[in-house]
Amino acid sequence: MKSPRNTFLAITCFVFGFSILGFSQAANVYITPNGQAQGACTTNPQSPAWFNNPANWGTGTSQIGPGTTVNLCGTIATELTAHGSGTSSAPITISFESNAMISLPYCDNNNGCLNISGLSWIVVDGGTNGIIQNTANGSQLANQVDSVGIMANGPSCLNCEIKNLNIINLYVHSLPGDTHNFGVTGGIFAGGVSGNAFLKIHDNVCHDVRACLSYNPVANDSGLQVYNNNFYNADGINIENNGVSLVGYAIHDNQIHDIANWDASGCPYHHDGIHSWALTGGTSSGELFYNNLISGNFGTCPTGALFFEGTHSNSQIYNNVFMITYTQENNGIVNVNGTNFQVYDNTIIGDSGVGSDICFNIGAASGRPSITFENNILVNCNTLLLTQNSPKYTLWDYNTYGGCAATGCNSGTPIVVNGSSFDTFAAWQAACACDSHSQYGAPTSFAGLNSSGVPQSGSPAINDGANMTSIGLAALDSDTSAGDTRTPTARPAGACGAPGQSSCWTIGAYNYGSGGPNPPTNLSAVVGN
């Protein structure tokens, strides 16, 4: 008759003991500038020094551990360093309460403003308006030093997420004579992730830094996801692959724009929306780059809006809008090097005021690189298309080409293959045995686009593209988000019997009748003292 009671006591003791061992760390920790109550941080607040002490990380009843949310309030004027990891079911969250910020004259490039290196299952959430910033670092400010906003490197933060933050003013470049030689720097400086691990960077605003993301892959790296961000007054993303096999990452739905503030004497800083390189024996494959808007003034020193340098393969580039201005662009607005690129439904618009530029450049690769190039619009470049090393046109068709208005543009069709120019579009079609359903017109206005790159009534791009539903890319079945500035609209799903039918897709990134991108949001101007 006593067994049920003993069983109950045993279960009660087990549950109590399990809770002490597994779930006794603090649910919420509050950090304020001085450890005193501020804003939403009123329950037993602690100081930044308390956060930085490894003794306060663990599974004790008042420690930071799996499942803890660390709430930041007010203006934290101290670099922060995390000392513990969460778990897949109970990550540690570092959350910025309303108007919270980490703000110093400058953060160093060893710890950064916030260091999460070598940990796992950490979420950094900026909330509604969280900020990481320097206040006195830049060309005309008190300091000119390398600085990092969030350090997640050596080794990386595995299965970590950085979202909803404003990472700003780490280095405000405002003088052409400022040629500071940068070392480790960036809004986010991250090491690679491999296996099933990930690093997600999304819904952030980053500006006035050397590069918003500097990423160093590791062998068999496949875990980087960068999306829904707004990057400007900075290089957007540098994927720095030296000697390893990077096997996939996804960059999509980002705005990257206006890098001309980094113009400097002698062009020590090459401006890139994204620069992904695979050099010194490194290889990159399986890259996904889609739904991005790369726009604005890239100044006098651009390398490209998109530059895949080195040995790349099996990469997909689709639904992007490239629409930049510049003083010169000799490498190509889009410049890809490698083989087996699949390039679909992009809109690439050059600068009508420049007489020497390239819209799309297929760089050299060993053998004959295989390229699929379909449903793209190229317009307003001196050289619309430059190919090298005799590429193999696996599928190259249903494109719309428009000429260039600038003085000095090629008088014939501006397509150059291995140094040979073609005087007529028909000559190009015959030479490549491709583009049989594509159209070319010498005037810039031929493509019939508005100032945002959207086809207008009468455009030859309307219902003249291939229906590519069968490819199986879900994001391609709708038109572009243009860097998360608009809601994509569905493309036709039915079979396209012949160009001109309503079931055929409109060429380029936008459906006919769609609205263009909304203006960039959360912009701020910074004037040096």
Image (spheres, rainbow, N blue to C red):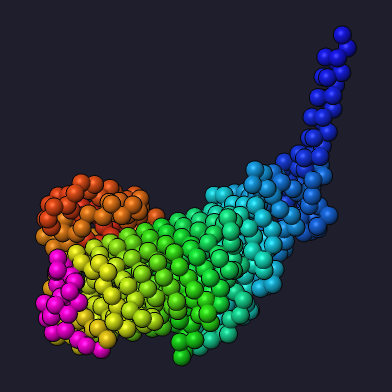
- Magenta stretch: residue 420 in it? yes
Determine if residue 427 is in view.
Answer: yes
Q: Is residue 77 left or right of residue 162?
A: right
The percent coordinates of residue 119 (x first, y second) are 69, 58
53 or 84, nearer to the observer: 84
180 or 176, nearer to the observer: 180
Q: Residue at x 74, y 54 (%)?
A: 84
Q: Residue at x 58, y 85 (%)?
A: 181
Q: Is residue 414 left or right of residue 81?
A: left
The percent coordinates of residue 36 (x first, y second) are 77, 49
The percent coordinates of residue 486 (x first, y second) are 34, 52
Q: Residue at x 52, y 68 (%)?
A: 246
The percent coordinates of residue 130 (x first, y second) are 58, 55
Q: Is residue 292 left or right of residue 40?
A: left
Give the residues in magenta: 419-440
The answer to whether 204 is drawn above or below residue 359 in the figure is above
Query: Which quarter of the figure has residue 368?
Result: bottom left
* Quarter containing the N terminus: top right
